[in-house]
Image: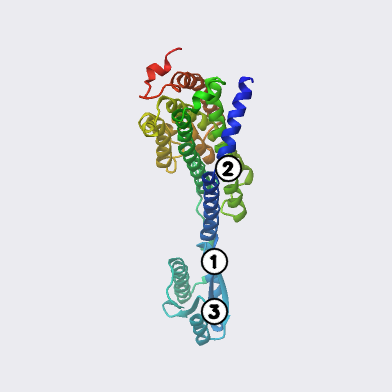
Amino acid sequence: MGSWATVRLVAGRELGVRLRSKVFRITTVALLVLLVGAAVVIDLVGGGDSTESVGVTAAESAITAPLTAAARSLDVGITTREVPDEATGLRQVADGDLDALVTASPNGLRVAVKEDLNDEWRAVLAVVARQQVLDNEISVLGGDPARVNEAVAATRVDVTQLDPAPAHQGERLVLGIAAALLIYMGLMLYGPAVSQGVIEEKSSRVVELLLSTVRPWTLMAGKVLGIGLVALIQMIVLAGGGLVAALVTGALSLPSGEATGTVIWSVVWYVIGFFLYALPFAAVGAMVSRQEDVGGISSPIVLAIVVPWVLGISIVPGDPDNGLIAVLSLLPIFAPVLMPMRIALGVAPVWQLVLSVVLALALIGVLVRLAGRIYRNAVLRTGARVSFRDALREA
């Protein structure tokens, strides 16, 4: 059997065993439900109907237009309804048919509500009340309130944006953080799984039987590839399901093409990141014989995953164009977590994307060689932990 056929055979075994695992299925379903639920909650909280129904007496119907204009200017939903008299309006407010009843008073306005008046409506009514008093004063002085209001309405403020934020910036940020979080969780889950799988085979002496028929590097490559395919399937299910849920519910109003592009790049970086970290995890797994010993030797790899995540969520939301983050996102050990965030926010130029991918692939090539040598030299040695010097020594 050829080397690549062996790799495919080992990878297929890992894929089949792990896809049938209850842990994998339960974890995938739970995370997918969590993502869909988050999209629904965001839509309900952000897109709920906040329109207020306001009653105005027939004798004071002239106040309807100022109320509607003030509410529109402050982005507050309003529907007005005419009631025959104040007593009827108060009864409807008490019964819950109206949210508020607005009537005129000598010093402005009176408003009746069932329980409390929220801050948004307090601001709307304050604007209308001031306008009513101003109109009265203009009339007393012999002026024309309508003409004054037209002149005031014609005024404007011209704003020059020196560095305007892209559209949907908040949604871009949420999408970027969600992508980075999925990648971070995937790497933290499936990277150590490679070490655990190697140690299990080594401690049970299964690896000795396998290496009597296959070459060490093919066994290592097949295990990494198989677990990587499992991780990729889960990532596609979660990212795709979350994206569809966000677009369908309206929680995400970004153009679908742009959102899909961000998700595709996130999957690409997940694959690249997995091989960047899984190969070292496989190597350190071969250097120890017990699960208890892998924590200390693999801590630098875990730290290399945690640091970019912490930097990303600490700096990127407040400063997407941060120079330090831009430089770090080009480095292979930081790119899988940081670059998807920058892609989602639209601050990563094409040349940086290309450079970061090239550097990451180049490092993967180096890691394949180094991890293969460590695995070959260490996987059959039991007992005490194998030192890096001995593991890297030419056979």
Residue type indicated by callout 2: Arg
Crowding at dot 3, Cα within 10 Å, few <14 / some 14-19 / many 20+, comes out as: some
Crowding at dot 2, Cα within 10 Å, few <14 / some 14-19 / many 20+, comes out as: few
What residue is disc 3 on?
97
Q: Position of residue 14 (x, y in %)?
A: 56, 34
Helix or strand or loop: what does disc 3 sit on? Answer: loop
- Residue 77 is labelled as 1
Given the current orientation, which residue lies at the most extreme top position? Answer: 394
Q: Nearer the viewer, residue 230 or 273?
A: 230
> Is tag 3's residue or tag 2's residue first in the polypeptide sequence?
2
Q: Give the quarter of the figure containing the N terminus.
A: top right
Residue type indicated by callout 3: Asp
Residue at x-position 50% and y-position 75%: 99
Residue 274 vertical position relative to residue 114 in the rendered view, above or below:
above
Crowding at dot 1, Cα within 10 Å, few <14 / some 14-19 / many 20+, comes out as: some
Helix or strand or loop: what does disc 1 sit on? Answer: loop
Q: CA distance from mark 1 to mark 2?
A: 51 Å
Q: CA distance from mark 3 to mark 1?
A: 16 Å
Q: Nearer the viewer, residue 202 or 127?
A: 202
Coloring basis for residues: rainbow
Between label 1 and label 2, give the one nearer the viewer: 2
What residue is disc 2 on?
20
Q: Quadrant of residue 16?
A: top right
Residue type indicated by callout 1: Gly
Residue at x-position 50% and y-position 85%: 91
Q: Position of residue 154 (x, y in %)?
A: 54, 59
> Is tag 3's residue or tag 1's residue first in the polypeptide sequence?
1
